[in-house]
Image (cartoon, rainbow, N blue to C red):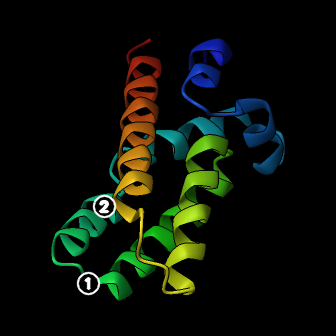
Amino acid sequence: MNEKNLKNAGIDCLSGVRRFAGSAELYEKYLRKFIDDENLSCAKKAMAEKNYEDVLKYIHTLKGVTGNLSMTELFNSCGELVVKLKNKEFNNLDDIFERICLLYSKACESICVESEN
């Protein structure tokens, strides 16, 4: 696991390994599983429909997953969107959501590179 590569994608793998009782193998297993997570694709569909209740549900779940995996930047952005949705503040949602999509892609690309090695 290339810590520098993952860190550049906003993933704190040292913290992540600690969350998994010090097992780098178990942490890597769940990092690889993240690529198959469907919460963001479901949230994209809900955003397009302006179904903010569903967006909240999917992004809140994604926030939990990214928190457990120590994907700090993505976790923080999901948290920002969750707060706005809970407070029914619908301005600037697209900007935050776009940032989430970019961070998500960056994280997935980094994980894929690590999986190939």
Q: Residue at x 54, y 47 (%)?
A: 30
Disc sitting over residue 7 in the figure: none
Residue nearest the observer in this picture, 71 or 14? 71
Other-residue count near label 1 (Cα within 10 Å), few / some / many at <14 / 14–19 / ≥20: few
Q: Is residue 48 left or right of residue 94?
A: left
Q: Amino acid at mark 1?
A: Asn
Where is residue 37, by image quadrant? bottom left
Q: Residue at x 45, y 38 (%)?
A: 103
* SS for dot 1: loop
Residue nearest the observer in this picture, 59 or 87? 87
Q: Quadrant of the N terminus?
A: top right
Dots 2, 1 in contact, CB < 8 A? no
Residue 88 is situated, as x and y percent measured from the top left of the image, at: 49, 86
Count all numbered tags in the image, as a single digit. 2
Residue 87 is situated, as x and y percent measured from the top left of the image, at: 57, 86
In this rendering, is residue 44 above or below 90?
A: above
Residue 41 is situated, as x and y percent measured from the top left of the image, at: 25, 60
Q: Amino acid at mark 2?
A: Glu
Q: Quadrant of the C terminus?
A: top left
Where is residue 45, by image quadrant? bottom left
In this rendering, is residue 53 above or below 109?
A: below
Other-residue count near label 2 (Cα within 10 Å), few / some / many at <14 / 14–19 / ≥20: few
In space, the residues marked 2 and 1 are separated at their CA atoms by 17 Å
In this rendering, is residue 21 above or below 46?
A: above
Q: Is residue 92 left or right of residue 46?
A: right
Q: Which residue is mark 2?
A: 38
Where is residue 6, by image quadrant? top right
Q: Which residue is mark 1?
A: 51
* SS for dot 2: loop
